[in-house]
Structures are given as structure tokens and as C-alpha cells.
């Protein structure tokens, strides 16, 4: 299930990583009439990147309607189909138009189309996986979205490197960028094929009142019979949660999200996480890594692409490690805090290096700066990478997840557009300032995680709302697990059942957020 949906993450990653290695190639510049003036080049290429993200922005808005009305599975199929068409159309602009400006306009339109597909899929994949996963491995399975994303980024890096090695930087070899654009269609095709054989999200089915199907799908996903006690208990909890609320329209969901300060904050967490995630600078590194490696002292196009390819491979290895050994074992909060601190230190060091050596060089310092970039991506992979997706999907209420996840991804694409447009300008005009901005905002993100984010790992989705009764108190309480491994958590529902059996009186949710009552659950 998770693998089938996560091809959508590879769509996302391939789109992020591919374009950075294509923009500097002479064949691409010649085909679309892009000159060598640094300011003009930064402006035109910035728009080539941004136009795709504008499509993603509108696709994410559309996802709220589609996933709520037609389900997660159908939304993934629809988004994957749009992306596939848009990707294939990007291979033929110079075939249809001989004038470079007309070809560039056509390319931008097709990149926007593909972006709409990515935008639809981007919030639905983690939602679908989270809603379908058992609580004890939910973080790991939801984090697979990030794993496929970084595989897509790394795959696009190595394809760019291979194409450059084969074709060189010959301005006459249009096949270099045509093949690169065409290969990004592969994950879209795999998403369509694999999701055809998957079930709908059990929690979405429950929201539609299809409780028999909910139980059937849960049994299929868990690989057991419908009469299995754990499936019966989970289905009953999902049904109880769904029946406690009436079905809401998107407008009513928006009103419900703002019905109280606690609810508004909880529903804002996807927006907060995604905004901070972009201002750590990760997608600036993804889009413009060849330029950044050149800035840090790697000379030559081949060396820059090779450095970028290794950068992508490091991300894959680190993501595998954190999914296997970190996200469930140490929780989301500790990874966000320690990973964020590592990112901030690396960004600030690189900023100091670029300030002191604006033209590269610097001997040993340049190698330390390059190593800092790799340490940055290790820190990101251990923190604001795999931990971000489960933290976001777990924190929001079931009946508002379609809307809040869409808002989260809209905020991500909005900030990505801003970062992508400003980054090439900053790198050209005041390069050290970009790194200082990213380092400083990452420190703010760490402070937020310390003070205002409670640990959500290990709880049933239906129980997590109790953690937000007093979010500051709960967040400070959970900080004790920053330096030690948290114990295996027991769910609120299980505790309630046990106390009801022994005392005939269940615990009240009023005390759930206190350190005393939490100790009983941990």
C-alpha cells in the first residue's frame, strides 16, 4: 500500500531535482533562447522553476475538493494522470515551435500542467498512507513518501550526470534535455499502475458512512480476517470517531477548523511544518545544487553534477537509516529538534565561508564547506525530512484532514515559489545572505518544536486530540525524550477500556494532557 502510493513522492522528487541540472546546459539555453547574462539568466530560469510550482500550488488547492469528495485513491489516479501527460508534453516544445520564445512559453505551460498533477498528489499520498497504516509503524510507512521523494531527486541527479557524460555540453544535442524531461514521466506511470490495485482509505470510507467497507479494508491491509479482535477494535474506534461528527462541506470544515483557538492551532500545524520545512533551504539546495557546488569550489559542470549526484545518494542512505532506526524509536519531536540544529549550524558555517571567499577557493575551508553541505543534508534527512510527514498527518483531526493537508501543501508550494524565485537572485547578488536566512529560520523552527509541538508518535489517530488540550505544557513535558528513547506508548482508548473494566469509571479527557496522566500512558 505504502509503496504503491509513494510513487507520488518520486513524482515530486524527480520534478524537484531534474530541472537544476538541465537549466545550465548549452543545448537547453540554445533551444529556448536563454542568454548568458547572469541577471537575465537568473530571472528566466527562476520563472521556469516557479511556473511548475504555481501549478503545484493550484493542484494542492484542488486536492482538498477531490480527496474529500472522491476519495484518496481516485485523487491519486487523477493527479498521476495529469502529471504523466504534462511530463510527456515537455519533450516536444521545439518540435512544435521553431521560435525559441514560443517554445519557452509552451514549455512553461506544460510544466504548469505537470505541476498541477504533483500538487494534487502531494497532500494526498501522506494522508492516504497515514489513514491506512497501523499506529506502531505509521511514522515509518508515512515516511516512505519522503524516501521515494529523495530517490526521485537522486535519480534525476544521476540521470542528468549520465546524460552530460554521454552528450557533453554540446548546444546542438537537444536530446539531452528531452530525455531528462521524458524520464520524469516514469514515476507517474508507476503510480497509476500500482494504485489501480489498492483499496480506498478506511478512514475516508468511514467518513462516508461505509463502515462495513472500512472493516473489510482494514482486514485486507492488516492481512487478517474481518473477525480479528484488533481489526474489530480499530474499526470500532474509527466508526465511533466518524459518528461523533456530521459530514461537513469544505466551507463547514473551514469554520470548524477555526471554531476554537485549540482547534485552529491544531489545524495550522501542517502549514507551520511545511513553511518551516521550506525555509530550512532544502529545496533551494535541490534546485540549484550544481550552482551551489560551483560556488563552494567544485569547478567544471561535470564536477558540479557529480557532487550533486553524491548529494542525492547521501540523502537516500540517511533517509533509509532514519526510517529504519529513528522515526518510530525516537519519535518525531527529537528528530525535528536535533536535525534542525544540525541544519542551522551547517547553513551558518557555509554562509560565513561564502562571505569570506565569495569566489570559491580558500583551500581547506572549501572542503570543509562542501562537507558541511553533506552534513546539512544528513541533518535534514534525520529531522525535517522523514519526521515531517507523519508529524503533519497525525496532528490534524480525521474529519478535517483533507482541508488541512491541502492548506499545508499550499503553504509549502507558496514558500517554495518564494524561495525558488529569490534563491538564484540571492546566489548571484549576495550569496552569503541566502545561507544566513536559511540558518536563522531553521533555528526558529527548532524553537517552535521545543515549545509548541507535542510528541504524536505511537498514539492512535483518534486519541491524539488529547495531546493538544494544553499544548505548551505537553510540549515541555515531551522534551524529556530529546535525550532518551521514549517508552512504548499505550493508547488512550486501551487505557480507558482497562480502567472501565477494573473501576467501571473511565478516565476523563480533561486530565489527558497533564504530566501525571501522561505518565500512566507512557
Image (cartoon, helix red, strand yellow):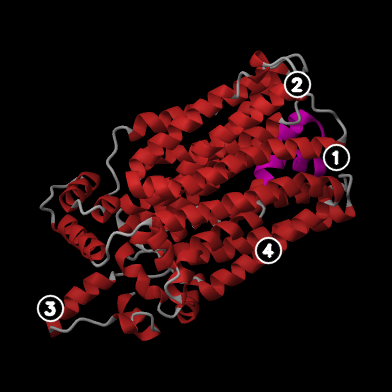
Image quadrant occupied by the C terminus:
bottom left
- Does the magenta run of residues contain 306? yes
The image position of residue 149, as x and y in percent, is 52, 42
Give the alpha-carbon distance from disc 1 to disc 4, as whole Å.
26 Å
Do the CB atoms of the residues marked 4 and 2 lie less than 8 Å apart? no
The image position of residue 206, as x and y in percent, is 24, 54
Element class at badge 3: helix
Quarter of the image for residue 94 reads: top right
Lower position in the chain sequence, tag 4 or tag 2: 2
Q: Nearer the viewer, mark 4 or mark 2?
A: 2
Callout count: 4
Identify the residue shown where x is 27% and y is 82%: 508
Residue beneath disc 2? 100
Image quadrant occupied by the N terminus:
top left
Q: Is the stretch drawn in magenta largely helix, strand or loop?
A: helix
Label 1 Cα neighbours within 10 Å, binned few <14 / some 14-19 / many ≥20:
few
Lower position in the chain sequence, tag 2 or tag 1: 1
Do the CB atoms of the residues marked 3 and 1 lie less than 8 Å apart? no
Residue 243 shown left or right of residue 10 in the figure: left
- Residue 39's disc is 1
Element class at badge 4: helix
User: In this picture, which residue range is highlighted in magenta?
Assistant: 284-307
Give the alpha-carbon distance from disc 3 to disc 1, as whole Å.
72 Å
- Does the magenta run of residues contain 21? no
- Residue 441's disc is 4
Amino acid at each position: 500500500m505504502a509503496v504503491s502510493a509513494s510513487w507520488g513522492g518520486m513524482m515530486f522528487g524527480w520534478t524537484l531535482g531534474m530541472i537544476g541540472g538541465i537549466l545550465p546546459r548549452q543545448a537547453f539555453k540554445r533551444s529556448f533562447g536563454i542568454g548568458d547574462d547572469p541577471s537575465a539568466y537568473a530571472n528566466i530560469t527562476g520563472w521556469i522553476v516557479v511556473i511548475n510550482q504555481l501549478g503545484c500550488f493550484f493542484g494542492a488547492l484542488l486536492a482538498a475538493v477531490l480527496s474529500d469528495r472522491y476519495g484518496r485513491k481516485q485523487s491519486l489516479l487523477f493527479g498521476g494522470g495529469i502529471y504523466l501527460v504534462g511530463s510527456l508534453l515537455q519533450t516536444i516544445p521545439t518540435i512544435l515551435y521553431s521560435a525559441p520564445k514560443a517554445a519557452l512559453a509552451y514549455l512553461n505551460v506544460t510544466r504548469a500542467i505537470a505541476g498541477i498533477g504533483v500538487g494534487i498528489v502531494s497532500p494526498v499520498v501522506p494522508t492516504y498512507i497515514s489513514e491506512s497504516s497501523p499506529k506502531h509503524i505509521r511514522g515509518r510507512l508515512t515516511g516512505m513518501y519522503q524516501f521515494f521523494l529523495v530517490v526521485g531527486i537522486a535519480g534525476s541527479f544521476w540521470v542528468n550526470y549520465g546524460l552530460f557524460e554521454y552528450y557533453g555540453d554540446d548546444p546542438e544535442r537537444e536530446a539531452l534535455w528531452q530525455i531528462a524531461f521524458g524520464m520524469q514521466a516514469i514515476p507517474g506511470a508507476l503510480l497509476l499502475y500500482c494504485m489501480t490495485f489498492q483499496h480506498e482509505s478506511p478512514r475516508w470510507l468511514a467518513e462516508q458512512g461505509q463502515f462495513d467497507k472500512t472493516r473489510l479494508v482494514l482486514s485486507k491491509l492488516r492481512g487478517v480476517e474481518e473477525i480479528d479482535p484488533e481489526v474489530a477494535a480499530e474499526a470500532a474506534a474509527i466508526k465511533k470517531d466518524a459518528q461523533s461528527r456530521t459530514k461537513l462541506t469544505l466551507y463547514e470544515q473551514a469554520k470548524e477548523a477555526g471554531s476554537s483557538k485549540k482547534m485552529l492551532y491544531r489545524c495550522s500545524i501542517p502549514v507551520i511544518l511545511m513553511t518551516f520545512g521550506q525555509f530550512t533551504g532544502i529545496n533551494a539546495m535541490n534546485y540549484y545544487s550544481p550552482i551551489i557546488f560551483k560556488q563552494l569550489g567544485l569547478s567544471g559542470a561535470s564536477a558540479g553534477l557529480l557532487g550533486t549526484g553524491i548529494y542525492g545518494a547521501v540523502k537516500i542512505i540517511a533517509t533509509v537509516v532514519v526510517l529504519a532506526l529513528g522515526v518510530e524509536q525516537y519519535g518525531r519531536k527529537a528528530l525535528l529538534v536535533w536535525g534542525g540544529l544540525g541544519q542551522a549550524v551547517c547553513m551558518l558555517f557555509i554562509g560565513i565561508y561564502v562571505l569570506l571567499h565569495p569566489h570559491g577557493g580558500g583551500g581547506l575551508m572549501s572542503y570543509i564547506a562542501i562537507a558541511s553541505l553533506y552534513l546539512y543534508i544528513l541533518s535534514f534527512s534525520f529531522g525535517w525530512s522523514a519526521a515531517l510527514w507523519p508529524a503533519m498527518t497525525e496532528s490534524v483531526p480525521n474529519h478535517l484532514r483533507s482541508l488541512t493537508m491541502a492548506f499545508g501543501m499550499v503553504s509549502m508550494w507558496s514558500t517554495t515559489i518564494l524561495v525558488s524565485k529569490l534563491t538564484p537572485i540571492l546566489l548571484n547578488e549576495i550569496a552569503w545572505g541566502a545561507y544566513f536566512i536559511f540558518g536563522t529560520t531553521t533555528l526558529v523552527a527548532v524553537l517552535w518544536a521545543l515549545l509548541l509541538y507535542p510528541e504524536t508518535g505511537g498514539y492512535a489517530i483518534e486519541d491524539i486530540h488529547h495531546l493538544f488540550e494544553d499544548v505548551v505544557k505537553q510540549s515541555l513535558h515531551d522534551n524529556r525524550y530529546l535525550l532518551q528513547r521514549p517508552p512504548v506508548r499505550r493508547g488512550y482508548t486501551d487505557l480507558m477500556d482497562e480502567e472501565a473494566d477494573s473501576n467501571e469509571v473511565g478516565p476523563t479527557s480533561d486530565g489527558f494532557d497533564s504530566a501525571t496522566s501522561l505518565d500512566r500512558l507512557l
